[in-house]
Image (cartoon, grey):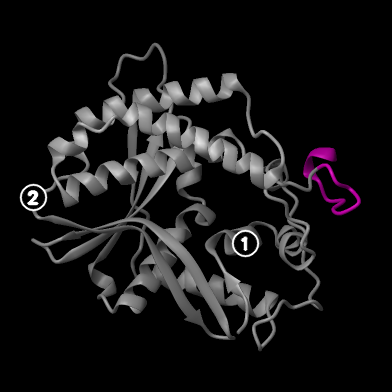
């Protein structure tokens, strides 16, 4: 069996192949969580639990869940998990308190307006954290997990959701970033093939949780942002082509890492800012921010 790849691998290569090489071929990657990943994971878990109870039991029972306590518990559990895996504390008490407070504000807002985003009549929950295991050419397997899938029995359509947490939502530049939006396009393709469901009856949506709202503005603000990227045939073909390029460049015919390829460094303000090797000139001398 060859290698197993994930969307995070593919998106990392698409941004900077050399960073991907350091992480996966050279095995320089280390687990590093932070308050943003901790909060994101915890919020995922709370929302998925709420929606599972709502769709499999009753909306009344979902509304009666102690979401504040659930969020606090999940944040504590995930904090300890990150500490155990990395050996370090990923944030301080002040960060935890601020993000928890933001999360409570969001959850109260969401529950009072849940019907604007998730309706029970005519919809069925197919599951949360649905596993994608799809065999690709070259002895490669793609593995991922879909946050949430609903089935619209009236229209006989599926909607695949990816839950994202953000400080104040996605701006137009993030929405145009293919490394963000291609994830749902691949999930759409692979779900269709793995579960034999017509691809033209699958919709996709990023459900974006906003921690903060703008202050001193006169217009009403929502704490949820919904974004559905173009996912028709042209968009699907483009991401499929990029994935094929990734496999061709980074893997051998039997599905092992390509050790001979020279991986290019894509130094940019954005790429280097979030790179874990930005302060390691012995590993990468292309840090944009050191220029």
* Quadrant of res 107: top left
Quarter of the image containing the N terminus? bottom right
* Secondary element at tag 2: loop
Q: Which residue is mark 2?
A: 121
Q: Position of residue 66 (x, y in %)?
A: 29, 29
Say if mark 2 contacts mark 1, CB within 8 Å.
Answer: no
Q: Please name which of the two marks, 2 or 1, marks the residue nearer to the observer.
A: 2
> Can you identify the residue that label 1 sits on?
14
Q: Is residue 127 left or right of residue 124?
A: right
User: Residue visible at 43% across and 24% down?
Assistant: 102
Question: Which of these two is toward me, 191 or 287?
Answer: 191
**Residue 257, image x, y percentages:** 72, 76
Q: Residue at x 25, y 49 (%)?
A: 52
Region rendered in magenta? 279-291
**Mark sitting earlier along the chain (2/1):** 1
Q: Is residue 94 left or right of residue 60?
A: right
**Residue 12 visible in image:** yes
* The C terminus lies in quadrant: top right
Q: Is residue 108 above or below residue 279?
A: above
């Amino acid at each position: 069996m060859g290698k197993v790849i994930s969307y995070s691998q593919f998106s990392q290569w698409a941004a900077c192949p050399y960073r991907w090489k350091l992480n996966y071929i050279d095995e320089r990657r280390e687990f590093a969580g932070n308050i943003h990943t901790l909060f994101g994971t915890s919020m995922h878990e709370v929302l998925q639990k709420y929606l599972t109870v709502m769709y499999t039991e009753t909306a009344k029972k979902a509304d009666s869940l102690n979401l504040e306590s659930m969020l606090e518990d999940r944040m504590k559990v995930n904090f300890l998990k990150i500490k155990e895996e990395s050996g370090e504390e990923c944030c301080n008490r002040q960060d935890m308190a601020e993000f928890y407070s933001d999360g409570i504000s969001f959850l109260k807002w969401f529950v009072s307006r849940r019907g604007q985003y998730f309706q029970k009549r005519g919809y069925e929950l197919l599951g949360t954290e649905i596993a994608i295991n799809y065999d690709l050419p070259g002895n490669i397997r793609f593995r991922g997990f879909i946050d949430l899938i609903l089935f619209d029995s009236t229209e006989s359509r599926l909607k695949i959701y990816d839950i994202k947490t953000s400080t104040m939502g996605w701006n137009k530049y993030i929405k145009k970033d293919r490394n963000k939006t291609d994830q749902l396009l691949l999930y759409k393709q692979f779900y269709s093939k793995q579960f034999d469901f017509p691809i033209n009856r699958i919709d996709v949506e990023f459900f974006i949780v906003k921690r903060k709202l703008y202050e001193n503005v006169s217009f009403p603000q929502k704490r949820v942002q919904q974004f559905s990227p173009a996912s028709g045939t042209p968009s699907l073909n483009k991401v499929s082509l990029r994935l094929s390029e990734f496999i061709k460049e980074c893997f051998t015919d039997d599905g092992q890492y390509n050790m001979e390829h020279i991986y290019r460094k894509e130094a940019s303000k954005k790429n280097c800012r979030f790179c874990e090797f930005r302060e390691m000139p012995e590993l990468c001398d292309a840090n944009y921010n050191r220029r």
